[in-house]
Amino acid sequence: MVWAVEDKDDSLDRGIYVTLRPDMENVKDALGDRAGDEGAVRALVSSEIDKLNAHWPDWKRVKHIVIKKSEFNKTTGMKIRRFVEDNKLAD
């Protein structure tokens, strides 16, 4: 889920955020035994986002990454609820 903060008081919090839940099967394929290490998972996700950011202009780049372990809060139609604060926070 991608969202933005436009806090004019604190420039460190301003920018585009991505909240994601990694597919652990793909993470295990990429990292092997280190798949349980949160730092290794974060490094893998950061490297993939950096590859995407390289092709985008500055104003479109993801500045902050939030990794969730649990499922997103979803509607009965199994769509992610975008305006629920729990979906923006890590657990």
Image (cartoon, rainbow, N blue to C red):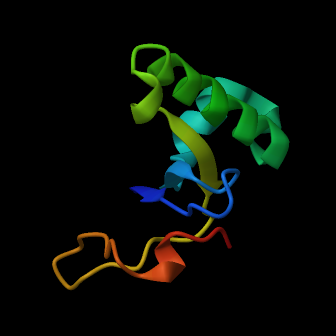
Q: Is residue 59 visible?
A: yes
| Residue nearest the observer in this picture, 33 or 67 | 67
Residue 63 x, y percent position in the rendering: 59, 40
Instruction: Report the residue at 51% width, 47% height from top.
Output: 23
Q: Please report the residue visible at 20 percent of the width from the left and 85 percent of the height from the top.
A: 76
Quarter holding residue 25: top right
Whether residue 21 sits left or right of residue 37 in the image: it is left
Q: Residue furthest left?
A: 77
- In the picture, the quarter occupied by the C terminus is bottom right
Q: Position of residue 86 (x, y in %)?
A: 52, 80
Measured from the top left, where is residue 52 in percent x and y?
45, 22
Left or right: residue 8 compared with residue 55: right
User: Residue 83 in the image: x percent, y percent?
Assistant: 35, 78
Answer with left or right where residue 39 lies relative to residue 87.
Answer: right
Residue at 23% of width from left, 73% of height from top?
78
Q: Please determine whether, in this image, residue 14 is positioned above or below residue 59.
A: below
Q: Looking at the image, is 73 positioned above or below residue 13?
A: below
- Residue drawn at x 83%, y 42% is 39
Q: Quadrant of residue 30?
A: top right
